[in-house]
Amino acid sequence: MMKDAKPNSAHFVLVKLEKDKKLNHVITQNIDGLHKMAGQLNVIELHGNTREIICIKCNKKISIEEAYKLLKSEFPPRCKYCNGSLRPNTIFFGESLSNKKLENAINLSKNCDLFLVLGSSLVVYPASYLPQIAKETGAKLVIINIDSTPLDEIADIVIHDKVSKVLTNFNIR
């Protein structure tokens, strides 16, 4: 299913905001790679993404399409550079996030003037703490999510609806 997933209208609204210099970065826990597929340039994928496969020995990355080709000829597929084992470039349960990615996300949160939470329950730490960091350092906080979140009470604006519906109905200038 993930192989066939495509960006939705919300992803493309974010790309437009970035191109118009109204959005600096996207920080995501999603591993689907859809932000980059939509054309987003400044994306921090805290948990990595399933569209890249990485060698656990030499850290070379290949696309998921290359990995599928390898799977047709060998199982398990091996790295063409060092013969190491390949795995999805994601963080599995129990593994630590990249310190560099997390530090970058924290710094961006501390220095933003508006923090948008889009389609997140805000229950997975440490990423769910980022909106609170932003709010504590003076940013406005907007949460758009179908269900309520633990941070709704500190948000400046809360909209309980589908992100794609809300973003595509705004007149973004």
Image: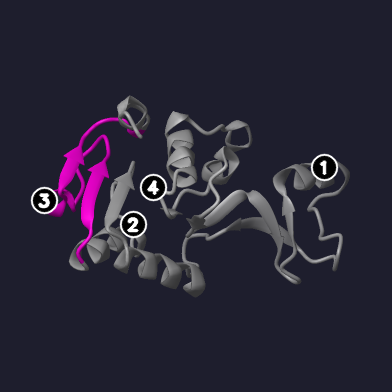
The amino acid beneath tag 4 is Lys
Place residue 103 in its image quadrant.
bottom left
Q: Position of residue 62 (x, y in %)?
A: 75, 54
Distance Cα–Cα, label 1 vs label 2: 34 Å
> Which structural element holds mark 2?
loop
Q: Residues within 10 Å of mark 4 (few under 14, many from 20)?
A: few
Which segment is the magenta one?
138-163
Place residue 38 in its image quadrant.
top right
Distance Cα–Cα, label 4 vs label 3: 26 Å
Q: Are marks 4 and 3 in contact (CB under 8 Å)?
A: no
Please indicate whether residue 67 sits to the left or right of residue 124 in the image: right
Q: Which residue is mark 4?
A: 22
Q: Which residue is mark 2?
A: 124
The amino acid beneath tag 1 is Lys
- Name which of mark 4 and mark 3 comes first in the sequence: 4
Q: Residues within 10 Å of mark 2 (few under 14, many from 20)?
A: few
> Which structural element holds mark 4?
loop
Distance Cα–Cα, label 4 vs label 2: 27 Å
Check residue 153 in the rendering and tell me which mark sits there, or answer none: 3
Q: Which residue is mark 1?
A: 69
Q: Position of residue 44 (x, y in %)?
A: 49, 58
Q: The N terminus is located in which quarter?
A: top right
- Name which of mark 2 and mark 3 comes first in the sequence: 2
